[in-house]
Image (tube, helix red, strand yellow):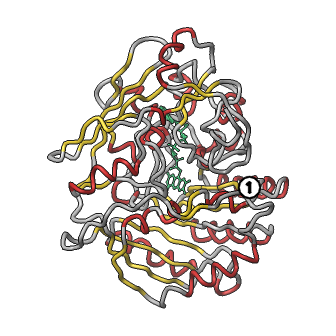
Amino acid sequence: MTAGEFDSWGRIDRRARQAVSPDGYENMRENAPPGAFLPFGNGRSYGDSCHNDQGRLIDSRMRTRILGFDPGTGIVSCDAGVTLHSILETAIPHRFFLPVTPGTAAATVAGAVANDVHGKNHHTRGTFGKHVRRLTLLRSSGGLLTCSPTENRDLFYATIGGMGLTGLILSVDLQLMKVPSAHIQQHAIRFDSLDEYFGMVEAVDGEHEYSVAWIDQLATGKRAGRGILLAGDHADASCEFPDMPRATKLSVPFSPPFNLLNTVTLKTFNEFYFRKEKRGETVTTVKWPGYFHPLDAIGHWNRLYGPKGLYQHQSVYPADNAPELTARLLETARTAGHASFLTVLKKFGEQKSGGLLSFPRPGFTLTLDFANQGEQTLKLLNVLDAMVVEAGGAINPYKDARMSPQTFDSSFSQWRKLEELRDPAMVSNFWKRTALALPK
Ligand SMILES: Cc1cc2nc3c(=O)[nH]c(=O)nc-3n(C[C@H](O)[C@H](O)[C@H](O)COP(=O)(O)OP(=O)(O)OC[C@H]3O[C@@H](n4cnc5c(N)ncnc54)[C@H](O)[C@@H]3O)c2cc1C
């Protein structure tokens, strides 16, 4: 396979990778040597959790059928490689929507299960896995298993958030959510400081289905931590359903020789983005793709980071010291000379994820994107990890390409249970670098 075909979104390690189809894997699985395979979705994970460079990837995108949709119950049944966009295409005409929507609709349904992804409504609906009614799982030995909260329960909860390590998901039954409209009534609330954000987020979350804040990570002094809180609810039924968006029109055709998202360009962008919202609160109705997946409108936008790619750092930490820790994380990155294009802050709700290795937990989650500047960036990321771990927090594994085994261990106390249930034929670069480097 050519380099680039199985990249992850961060584009840090771009090598040619070997892959087989799900059919090919079905024929080979019984004689599979340990660690010979790993399922691959659509490469929207940022680091090495979707790669297995000593083995072969199983390309889920070769099976993309919607197997059934019941407009009465809102349960959709589909192949593992179906994208979230395809599910929305099926569901929206019947006034159903995904109950949990990550920031890209290009993820596959199996990828969303395997990472137990979260959306802007974690405080109201929890994670993606909570809405999975059933899945079918092919292990390297034994037959096809049906897993659900009542059948093969342990494997079900290990597979949700299990990062592809428990076997190949072949199909998923997902409960969708009835909505009056797919459009969103958006409340954009501009805030001038982190104190202002922390002072209002609880009340705003209590009133709205969705809520997420963009932060100007480069603002300093009194303006440090300023940003825009984007809350929203599905609009009422009188709001016409939009035509489905046409295929992406804009695309970054190639990677420029250097990073275009640097401190200078981002300072200008942040100033513009902040000022485009009026002071106070602005209520508008926006089309759902613009609210949920604004970056999907620009194909290959990750190429803007240049040939060395990007690291994403997503952390979660308890609410107690969140205002102080958030300020320190932002300041540490800024003073280290790293500008983050997408700086996002969200309060996770109390709903516990069922998955053994699910990332969300009560507290605040901060996401930072950095262009890869080599050693300097790695050093910064280690400092940020240490601050989060010291506060009792965790680092997101499917956004990661470099955390230490110790950081992983502190972040995920249940990883040994997943290791017990791992399909021996499956392993990832991430799992080798973290879990398998720790004492059993
Ligand atoms: C712009 C952007 C915004 C994002 N926003 C969010 C967000 O808001 N919230 C969030 O949680 N995440 C977010 N993400 C991350 C993304 O949603 C997840 O990484 C998602 O899981 C990627 O799915 P994928 O289909 O591309 O799978 P991949 O990245 O290819 O793989 C993900 C995992 O799924 C496993 N897998 C894939 N197929 C199968 C299968 N058939 N059986 C078993 N395991 C399988 C792989 O082994 C791997 O461990 C975002 C990513 C991008 C690029």
| Lateral position of residue 349 relative to residue 271, left or right | left
Q: Amino acid at mark 1?
A: Leu
Picture residue at 70% right of the left edge, 57% below the top:
254
Instruction: From the top left corner, tell me how far across and down residue 413 is, in percent.
Output: 56, 38
Task: Identify the image quadrant of the N terminus.
Answer: top right
Q: Does the Cβ of the disc 1 residue fall within 8 Å of ligand 1?
A: no
Count all numbered tags in the image, as a single digit. Answer: 1
Instruction: From the top left corner, tell me how far across and down residue 152 is, in percent.
Output: 35, 23
* Figure quadrant of residue 170: top left
287 relative to 278, above or below: above
Rate crowding at label 1 as few (under 14), some (14 to 19) or many (20 or more) other CA atoms within 10 Å. many
321 relative to 86, above or below: below
Instruction: From the top left corner, tell me how far across and down residue 372 is, in percent.
Output: 77, 56
For label 1, the SS is helix
* Figure quadrant of residue 282: bottom left
88 relative to 4, above or below: below
Picture residue at 51% right of the left edge, 38% below the top:
41
Circle 1 sits on which residue? Answer: 381
Instruction: From the top left corner, tell me how far across and down residue 243 is, in percent.
Output: 31, 64
63 relative to 109, above or below: above
Task: Identify the image quadrant of the C terminus.
Answer: top right
- Residue farthest along the right direction in this orientation: 375
| Lateral position of residue 295 relative to residue 385, left or right | left
Picture residue at 75% right of the left edge, 52% below the top:
382
| Lateral position of residue 234 relative to residue 395, left or right | left
Q: Nearer the viewer, residue 134 or 10?
A: 10
- Residue farthest along the top direction in this orientation: 31
- Residue farthest along the bottom direction in this orientation: 279
Picture residue at 66% right of the left edge, 40% below the top:
48
